[in-house]
Amino acid sequence: MQKMETLAHFSGEFEDLSSTYLSINKGFHAYVSGDYKNAKIHFEKVIACESLRDKLCGHEVLRAYIVTLGKIQDSKALIQAENTVYSLINNSKIEDVSKGYLLEGLGRAHANFNTEESQKFFRLAFKHMDEARKQPDFLTIRYIQLTRSYLDLYKKSTSDPNKLMSVAIPALNDAEKYGFVRHKSQILNLINK
C-alpha cells in the first residue's frame, strides 16, 4: 500500500497512476519472463519519472533496469544508469540496504562485461549490506539475494566447495530461518552445479 501511495503522490509525470503502475508491472513481468528488451522499454518509462528515483519503488525499478541492461549488453545505457546510482548514493539519504541493492544490480550487470568490475560492485554492495544488517528493520531478503547473485559470479572463478560454502552458509541459514524456500533452493543449486 505504501508503494501505491508513493506512486499516487508522484504520478504527475505520467498521465495517471494507472499508467505508472502498468509500466512497472509490465516491466517486471517482462523481466521475470526473460524478455529483457521489452522490460527495458517499460523500465525506462518509469525511470524517466525523476521524483520516483529517491523512493524505494524507484530503487526496485532502477535495479531491475540495470540487471536488464547487463542481460541485453547495453553498455552505453549501463554507464548512464551507473552514474545515476552513484548520484543517488552520494547525493541522497537513501538507506544502506538500498545502496547495497543498487550496487548488487551493478555487480550483476557488469558480470556480463567485466568480472573485475563486477567484483568491485559486489564488494561495495556487501559493505553497505553489512551496515544495513545492524538496523532492526533490515530486510533479510536483500542479503540473501545479494549472496545468491554473488555466488553466481563467484562460482565462475572458483571450484573450491569450501570457499563457496563459506559465502553461502550465512545466507542459507537466514533463508531457512525466515522461510525463503525459493532462495535457499537457488543457492543450493548454485553450489551443487
Image: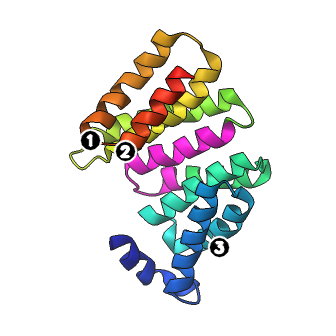
* Residue 106 visible in this rendered orientation of the protein: yes
SS for dot 2? helix
Q: Earlier in the sequence, mark 2 or mark 1?
A: 2
**Residue that numbered label 2 is attached to:** 141
Instruction: Tell me the CA gap for discs 1 and 3.
Output: 34 Å
Task: Say which residue label 3 marks.
Answer: 45
Q: Quadrant of residue 174?
A: top left
**Which of these two is toward me, 96 or 45?**
45
- Which label was assigned to residue 74? none
> Does 57 appear above or below 80?
below
Q: Amino acid at mark 2?
A: Ile
**What crowding class fits label 3: few (fewer than 14 Cα within 10 Å), some (14-19), or many (20 or more)?**
some
Between 16 and 160, the one lying in front of the other is: 160
The region drawn magenta spans 87-110
Q: Residue at x 49, y 56 (%)?
A: 91
Residue at the left extreme, as displayed: 136
- First reached walking from the N terminus: tag 1 or tag 3: 3
What percent of the width, then of the height, locates residue 22? 56, 77
Q: Earlier in the sequence, mark 3 or mark 2?
A: 3
What is the x, y in percent for residue 178?
26, 41
Please state which amino acid type lies under the numbered disc 3.
Answer: Lys
Magenta-colored stretch includes residue 88: yes
Mark 3 → mark 2, Cα distance in angstroms: 27 Å
Q: Are marks 2 and 1 in contact (CB under 8 Å)?
A: yes
Can you tell which mark lies on residue 178?
1
**SS for tag 3?**
helix
